[in-house]
Amino acid sequence: MRQGLPLVLTHIVEFVERHCLDKTGLFRLPGSVKRCQELRKHFDEGGFPEFDIGGDILTSASLLKTFIRELPGGLIPEPQMTQLLKVYNNQFPPVHYCFNATTTKGLHRVFESAAVTQRQTVGSV
């Protein structure tokens, strides 16, 4: 653990910060699925593979997104999310609150119909 994070996450974040911030499509375009699986296997086995600056830029970002998606309880666990939303919602002007509530409900419906719409994420909407 470093700074309260598993070393695998700090390893990936440091690589992204050092070598990837000027990459077009970072966190939007996918990296190599095969290479992502290879890196994941190395990390799962306790290793810390070296990233290839030429080929692992998008792959490292994809791997980081995978680890974030698989966090137990999500990035913000439900109890804390509920508390944050209560505080946050109380600070919205009424028009903004209504707009955000309506938009969120709509995006939730899009997410629920992902099997039909083939929309895997609403984060890029």
Image (spheres, rainbow, N blue to C red):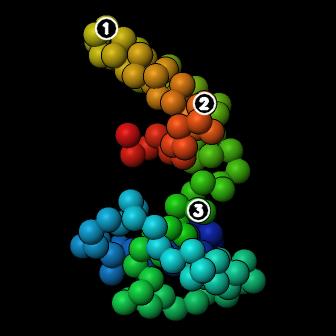
Image height of 61 relative to 89, above or below: below
Question: Which numbered tag is attached to residue 112?
Answer: 2
Q: In the image, what residue occupies the spot 43% across and 43% down?
A: 123
- Residue 96 horizontal side relative to residue 39, left or right: left
Q: Is residue 8 visible?
A: yes
Residue depth check, mark 1 versus mark 3: number of the one nearer the observer: 3
Q: Quadrant of residue 77?
A: top right
The residue identified by callout 1 is 94
Residue situated furthest right in the rendering: 45
Residue depth check, mark 1 versus mark 2: number of the one nearer the observer: 2
Q: In the image, what residue occupies the spot 64% across and 33% down?
A: 78
Q: Is residue 80 visible?
A: no
- Residue 20 horizontal side relative to residue 40, left or right: left
Task: Tell me which numbered mark, 2 or 3, is placed earlier along the sequence.
Answer: 3
Image location of residue 64, percent across then percent down: 52, 66
Q: Amino acid at mark 3?
A: Thr
What quarter of the picture does the N terminus occupy? bottom right
Report helix, strand or loop for mark 1: helix
Q: In the image, what residue occupies the spot 41% across and 87% down?
A: 55
Image height of 114 relative to 66, above or below: above
Report helix, strand or loop for mark 2: helix
Q: In the image, what residue occupies the spot 65% across and 31% down?
A: 79
Task: Tell me which numbered mark, 1 or 2, is placed earlier along the sequence.
Answer: 1
Image location of residue 5, percent across then percent down: 58, 65
The residue identified by callout 3 is 66
Q: Quadrant of residue 4?
A: bottom right
Task: Tell me which numbered mark, 1 or 3, is placed earlier along the sequence.
Answer: 3
Residue depth check, mark 2 versus mark 3: number of the one nearer the observer: 2
Q: Amino acid at mark 1?
A: Pro
Image location of residue 47, percent across then percent down: 67, 87
Q: Quadrant of residue 34?
A: bottom right
Q: Amino acid at mark 2?
A: Glu
